[in-house]
Image: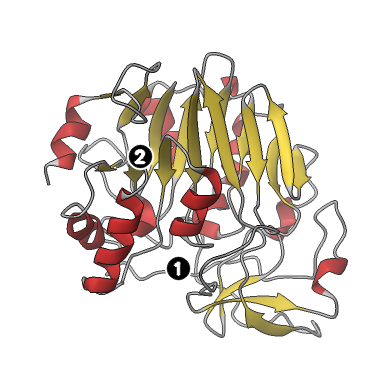
Amino acid sequence: MKVVSLLENTSTRSDMRTEHGLSLYIETGKHKILFDMGQSDAFAANADTLGVDLRAVGLAVLSHGHYDHGGGLAAFLERNSSAPVYLSRYAFEPHYHGEGRYIGLNPALRGSAQLHFTEGETRLGEGLTLCDCNQNTRERPLDSCGLQMAQRGSFGSNQSDGSAQPAPQMAQPEDSPEKNPGGSPQGDLAAGSQGIPDGCACTLVPEDFRHEQYLLVEEHSRRVLFSGCSHKGILEIVRWFRPDVLVGGFHFSGLPLDDTLAGYAAALDGYPTEYYTCHCTGSAQFQFMQQYMKRLHYLSCGQTVGILKPGGGAGIPALKMDKTLAAQQRV
């Protein structure tokens, strides 16, 4: 299995376009998968540069309904007219940062025939499972991280075809460029509508991230988990899945570099998991956590990780990294 970072906040390569967002290309012995699509068409341009043919992608997954992971959906649909795109039935519901900045998906895309709406656990094929973990028990309270969602009447009354209440079509950055150096939070989405749409009898409530889902890929006795932002809590997610490898953001950007973060790092290190983090983890937080974690690496735009068959230490996958990634890990 190989994982190629098509889009991330940072890159060590001058020929890569970067922005605040995430897009990964996953290739197994049986599948070619696109996981998230950034906030613009930058991931597609980078795919061309990296020699990844998006037309050959067999299926795509949208981890959650935020613009920095699904803003490039239109660009993918333009390039691939056959691959199913799996996203939560709640993904198109309006999502906001604070009280007024819309950070959701473009609702005009909701009717695409390529979209397949999921809930609970969904088998996508041999060795591929999507799960939203909405019914899983938690050891820690959920933190909404200052994010909100629009609610009108019974939130669960939305149709399984993904229909939802109206939402603004433009997004604003979930995080400032100062918090995400190297990213361009606007992308091709100009700062547009703010607040709840006119005529929408809805209220804003704290996010519960029911639209977030995780992709588990099982190959050669390895459990590789992909998580876009881990809004439901990276410690909870690792406890739920117990993966051999986890690739994705931890949503630690902006957290103080203190004993609390050190405790999170130590807890993660207690699992025999190899971590490839990126995007919303935060560069300062990543470097701080490296002091407490033996198997923590950074995956930036343009880099590739090869996950080999078993053969490493007990419980630790054998991994092959390109020279650029190895250099990045020494930062």
Where does the N terminus fall, quadrant-wise?
A: top left
Whichever of labels 1 and 2 marks the residue nearer the N terminus, that label is 1
**Is residue 301 among the parts visible in the rendering?**
yes
Give the number of the mark in front: 1 or 2: 2
Which residue is rendered at x = 34% and y = 57% of the image? 267
* Residue 185 x/y as whole percent: 40, 62
- The answer to whether residue 19 of the structure is visible from this angle is no
Residue that protrudes farthest toward the front in the picture: 314
- Residue located at (50% from left, 58% from top): 236
Identify the amino acid type marked 1: Pro
x, y percent for residue 79:
60, 31
> Which residue does the image show at 41% across and 41% down from the upper left?
247
In front of the other: 55 or 235? 235
Left or right: residue 272 compared with residue 236: left
Colour basis: secondary structure
Which disc is residue 270 wearing?
Answer: none
Lateral position of residue 267 relative to residue 297, left or right:
right
On the image, the x and y values in percent for residue 80 come to 64, 29
Give the residue number, with chain letter if any, for mark 2.
272
Total marks drawn?
A: 2
Q: Give the number of the disc on residue 173.
A: 1
**Mark 2 residue type:** Pro
Q: Does 35 appear above or below 268?
A: above
Helix, strand, or loop for circle 1? loop
For mark 2, give the secondary structure.
loop
Residue 128 is left or right of residue 154, and the answer is left
Question: Where 305 sits versus 212, above or below?
Answer: above
**Residue 112 coordinates in the image, percent (x, y):** 77, 43
Image quadrant in which you'd find residue 73: top right
Could you classify mark 1 by the number of other residues whose Cα lies within 10 Å: few (under 14), some (14-19), or many (20 or more)?
A: many
Around disc 2, counting alpha carbons within 10 Å, would you say few (fewer than 14), some (14 to 19), or many (20 or more)?
A: some
